[in-house]
Image (cartoon, grey):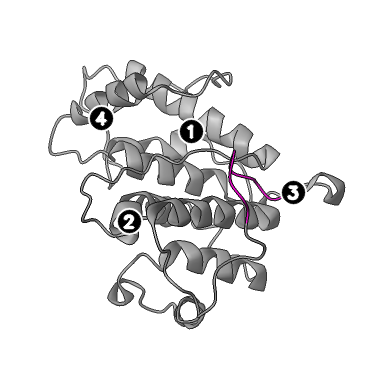
Amino acid sequence: MKPEPTAVAAPMREAEIDALQRQLDAVPPPLEPLDVSALDGYLCGVLLQPRPVPPDVWLPGVFDLDGRPLPPGFDAAPLQELVLRRHAELDRAIGRRDWFDPWIFQLDEADSPSEAVLPWVAGFAAAQDRCPALMAIDDAALVEPLALLYLHFDREDLEDADALLEVIDTLEPPADLAEAVQDLVRALMLIADVTRPRPKAATAAPRRPGGARRPGGGRRR
């Protein structure tokens, strides 16, 4: 059944995010659903495509990394409703160039910023595998914001990405998780300026509430 568009509601509360994770965990094996952090990155990767992606194309990638179908009898409606709600929330934030809080969690104080951000970025990358139109765009303005995201991967995972690696080598890694998240949101908005452009009079970089915004894309070494 084709999902119906979901109206933008209030931002999801922590209890609702926990409920979403439980529903993802309930997807039966051998399917491998995304966790909530990877899901959040995945939805952003879908929303930043140059053309809208129908839910029936991207939703299977939420329920299983390989897009395998759900088993007969599994009721995905409650899970799908929450996923579409977050999709609508992110769509609004990106379209308006508003700050939003990505679902990134530092579970261990010993985690580096990259370790905390990596599941989210892996979800973003999974969206590019499923919806390749963004990565097919030949535009120099995309290289630095993509580098800000992909710098969290090991270099060995970035085969045939010489242009990205060249820019990654010029960027300083974020000093802490707050800086990593700020860089991530800014990178998304810079990508949106290419794939979802707004009238110039309406374009403004997102400001984190209560925090200063750095000019430019990333910090150079």
Marks 2 and 3, Cα distance to the nearest angstrom?
Answer: 27 Å
The crowd level at tag 2 (other Cα within 10 Å; few <14, some 14-19, many 20+) is: many
Front residue (pair 27, 207): 207
Few, some or many residues within 10 Å of mark 4 (<14, 14–19, 20+): many
- Name which residue type carries label 1: Pro
Q: Does the magenta stretch include residue 66?
A: no
- Name the one closer to the observer, 152 or 75: 152
Residue 193 as seen in the image, left or right of residue 44: right
- Label 3 SS: loop
Viewer-nearest of labels 2 and 1?
2
Mark sitting on residue 97: none
| Left or right, residue 181 beside residue 196 | left
Q: Tell me if I can see residue 61 in this picture.
A: no
The residue that mark 1 highlights is 55
- Mark 4 or mark 3: name the one nearer the start of the chain: 4
Kindly identify the residue that appears in the image at 22 percent across and 25 percent down. 22
- Label placed on residue 24: 4
Residue 121 versus residue 56 in the image, above or below = below
Which mark's residue is nearer the viewer, 1 or 4?
4
How far apart marks 1 and 3 lie (CA) works out to: 29 Å
Q: Mark 2 sits on what residue?
A: 118
Query: Regarding mark 4 in the picture, which secondary structure is present there?
Result: helix
Whichever of callouts 2 and 1 sits on the residue coming sooner in the sequence is 1
Dot 2 and dot 4 residues touching (CB under 8 Å): no
> Residue 77 appears in which quarter of the rendering?
top left
Q: Residue 135 appears at what percent x and percent y?
A: 53, 63
Q: Give the SS element for disc 1.
A: helix
- In this picture, is 164 found above or below 67? below
Query: Is 210 inside the magenta-drawn segment?
Result: yes
Q: Nearer the viewer, mark 4 or mark 3?
A: 3
> Range of the magenta residues?
205-213
Label located before the other in sequence (1 or 3): 1
